[in-house]
Image: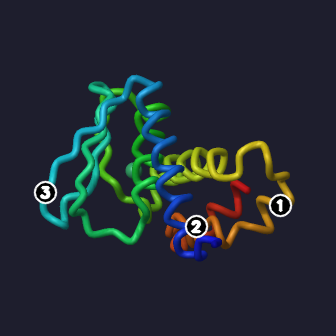
Amino acid sequence: MYPSFYDANEIALSEVTDVVYEKIAENNINVINISASETDSDIANINKRVIVFNPNFDTTFSVPFRLAHEMSHVLYGSRSKTYTFSPLSKSTEEIEANLNGIQILADIFFGDYYSATQRWEHRYRFIELFDLQPITHLVERCL
Ligand SMILES: [Zn+2]
């Protein structure tokens, strides 16, 4: 029996999330889960190489994208800075973290198996799976 499309998506999401966590660990970054209020966004502290993840945070973006976005701040952001999750901000640093976060997810999701043309053809499945609709234009810059 074939899994339904919904099940296939759930499996893909959970597998990609696992790989994101592995990459975070490989880069010596710690993730701390703190259940705070729904208005408290995720935070990246670059000096401490810590991502503070709030599972209660009210956002439409997927968990793996939130993690990949914060990981990008730690890897590429300016030292001594602390970032709060604000992917719709127009600041250069937020756009960079979005682009790098999308690239991390795309490289995991598509792997070497998909050509650039195939990545482009499957972009809407990618956008839907990771809830990236508000930043579709950035996904289209990456793929
Ligand atoms: Zn950010």
Question: How many residues crowd around disc 3 within 10 Å: few (fewer than 14), some, or many (20 or more)?
Answer: some
Rendered position, 49 above or below 70: above
User: Between tags 3 and 1, which lies in front?
Assistant: 1
Is the residue under label 1 in contact with that under label 3 (CB below 8 Å)? no
Q: Nearer the viewer, mark 1 or mark 2?
A: 2
Q: Which mark is residue 118?
A: 1
> Which quadrant holds residue 70?
top left
Residue found 64% across the figure and 61% down from its top:
139
What residue appears at the point 80 percent right and 52 percent down from the top-left corner? Answer: 114
Q: Do the residues labelled 1 and 2 touch (CB within 8 Å)?
A: no
Measured Cα–Cα span from mark 1 to mark 2: 19 Å
Question: Which amino acid, by three-letter code, is at mark 2?
Answer: Ala
SS assignment at label 3: loop
Amino acid identity at mark 3: Ala
Crowding at mark 1 (Cα within 10 Å: few <14, some 14-19, many 20+): few
**Element carrying mark 1:** helix
Say few, some or many: other residues with alpha carbon within 10 Å of mark 2 (under 14 / 14 to 19 / 20 or more). Answer: few
**Coordinates of residue 112 in the picture (x, y in percent):** 77, 43
Disc 3 CB within 8 Å of nearest ligand 1 atom: no
User: Residue 86: x, y in percent?
Assistant: 36, 59
Residue, disc 3 = 36
Q: Distance between the residues labelled 3 and 2?
A: 31 Å
First in residue order: circle 3 vs circle 2: 2
In this view, the residue farthest toward the front is: 1
Q: Earlier in the sequence, mark 3 or mark 1?
A: 3
Which quadrant holds the N terminus? bottom right
In the rendered structure, the answer to whether residue 83 lies left or right of residue 122 reads: left
The mark found on residue 8 in the picture is 2
Is residue 30 rendered to the left or right of residue 5? left
Q: Where is residue 92 in the image (x, y as percent from the top left)?
A: 50, 50
